[in-house]
Image (cartoon, grey):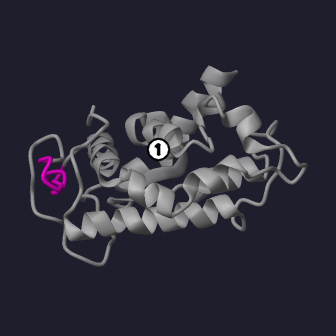
Amino acid sequence: MQTSRRIALVSLLFAMGASACVGGVSDGTSAPPPSGDDDGSSGSGTTTPPPTGTDPTAAANMLISQWSGCMTLTDFTTAKMNTAWGQMASSLGDACISCHGTGTEGFLVDTDATKMFTAISTDRDFLLSFFTPSAGKMTVNTALFQLVGTKQMPFQDHTPFDPTNNAGMTALQLFYTATMTQVTNGTCGAAKIPAM
């Protein structure tokens, strides 16, 4: 069941976001950062928007790759991602870390900041649990959290939780904003996930 759910998750993510991906990593209010190398990152803090007419899946893969280089451990810990997600529980009192501390169902949370950050910044599946390409930029994957928290298919066996008002989502929004600042300022590092 784990493999089929992971496939369903990735399929859902691309169905929701990839068809609209035609630009670079962007906050939607400013011009894209200066161009870098073909892999989406020059390693010097720049990103490359996909060429006009790029296949939507290729564009989404480029955005994911670029985003992986824009996230920093400092921003992650400042947002308290590991504390918020590592200590979060469902509405039935089940600690998220009890199932997801090992990455069950393609979602990893941990109180160890380095472990959790490394997982989401270097593994495409773990990153896509938190962020998704949509309309030419990376966004917080609120649709996934809504499905899981409200026990919708294919997550009907998950214990329920409030998908919008919780410490994890607050931390995730702070981390997203800090990462988007890296994008806007052109201070992203080298991509940690290849652009398939």
State the quadrant of the N terminus: top right
Residue 61, percent across and down? 31, 41
- Tag 1 residue: 117
Relative vertical location of residue 130 with respect to residue 195 in this rendering, above or below: below
Q: Relative to 120, is 196 on the left or the right?
A: left
Decide if residue 191 is in sight here: yes
Is 7 or 117 nearer to us in this picture?
Answer: 117
Residue 182 at what x, y percent from top left? 29, 64
Q: Residue at x 60, y 38 (%)?
A: 107
The residue lying at 48 percent from left, 35 percent from top is 125
Quarter residue 34 falls in: bottom left
Q: Is residue 73 above or below residue 158?
A: below
Give the magenta part as a residue range: 42-53
Quadrant (top left, top right, bottom left, bottom right) of the C terminus: top left
Q: Relative to residue 93, is residue 18 drawn left or right? A: left
Q: Secondary structure at mark 1?
A: helix
Q: Quadrant of residue 20?
A: bottom left
Can residue 154 be seen here?
A: no
Q: Give the left or right position of residue 194, taking residue 45 as reference.
A: right
Residue at 36% from the left image edge and 53% from the top image edge? 72
Residue 170 lies, in percent from the top left, at 61, 67
Of all residues shown, which one is farthest toward the bottom?
29
